[in-house]
């Protein structure tokens, strides 16, 4: 059974949000790749964490991003969906059914983390950009934003995952 250090998790949440909020509109490449790496905090929450607690954390973190980016609930709704499906998706993607799994890059491996995180980041970004765009208008521009933002966010989340992992477990 994985023991969750709630104080450490609160520090990680504060770090992710304090880094994301000032960089929200500055971390943009060629006007199509946006780095929404705050979703990494939700992805790193241990498998088997109380789902209600995770959804509240997702809602509050998304609302904080919404407040500072003047988006009316777009990030909050995307985060709540990700927190709702993340444990089930992990079981499907990694054929794993243990209740408690530490979802760090080192614990599940690079390929396991990629199969788990990349589709969830893609869904998160789809929700954000489709709602922000008001539908599927300008489909090719929209799909480019989703694709490149997913790749950028995944690279940043993967880097953060390696930096946050304990030194004795690093690959």
Image: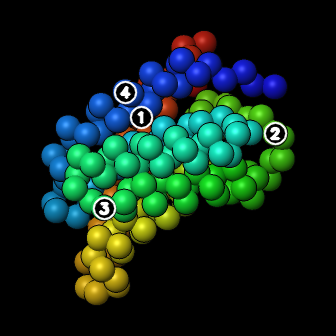
- Residue at mark 2 to residue at mark 3: CA–CA distance: 35 Å
Q: Tell me the residue that label 4 is attached to.
A: 15
The residue depicted at 62 percent of the width and 40 percent of the height is 53
Q: CA distance from mark 4 to mark 1?
A: 14 Å
Q: Nearer the viewer, residue 146 or 18?
A: 18
Per the image, the residue denoted by label 1 is: 159
Label 2: state its secondary structure. Answer: loop
Residue 104 location, quadrant = top right
Q: Secondary structure at mark 4?
A: helix
Residue under the image location 36 percent in, 60 percent down = 73
In the rendered image, residue 2, in percent from the top left (x then y), is placed at 75, 25
Mark 4 / mark 3, whichever is N-terminal: 4
Foreground disc of the pair 1, 3: 3
4 or 2: tag closer to the N-terminus: 4
Of residue 165 and residue 43, the one placed in the foreground of this image is: 43
Nearer the observer, 135 or 56: 56
Residue at image location 49% in from the left, 32% down from the top: 161
Q: Is residue 23 above or below residue 3?
A: below
Q: Please tell me which residue is depicted at 40% across the width and 49% down the height of the picture.
A: 62
Q: Which residue is mark 3?
A: 72
């Amino acid at each position: 059974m994985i023991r969750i250090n709630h104080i450490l998790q609160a520090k990680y949440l504060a770090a992710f949000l304090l880094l994301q909020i000032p960089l929200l509109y500055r971390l943009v490449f060629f006007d199509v790749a946006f780095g929404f790496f705050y979703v990494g905090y939700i992805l790193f929450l241990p498998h088997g964490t109380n789902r209600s607690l995770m959804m509240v954390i997702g809602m509050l973190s998304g609302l904080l991003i919404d407040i500072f980016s003047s988006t009316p609930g777009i990030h909050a709704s995307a985060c709540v969906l990700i927190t709702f499906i993340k444990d089930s998706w992990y079981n499907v993607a990694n054929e794993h059914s243990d209740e408690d799994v530490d979802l760090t890059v080192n614990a599940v491996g690079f390929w396991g983390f990629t199969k788990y995180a990349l589709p969830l980041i893609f869904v998160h970004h789809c929700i954000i950009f489709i709602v922000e765009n008001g539908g599927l208008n300008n489909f090719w521009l929209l799909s480019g934003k989703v694709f490149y933002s997913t790749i950028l966010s995944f690279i940043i989340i993967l880097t953060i995952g390696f930096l946050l992992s304990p030194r004795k477990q690093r690959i």
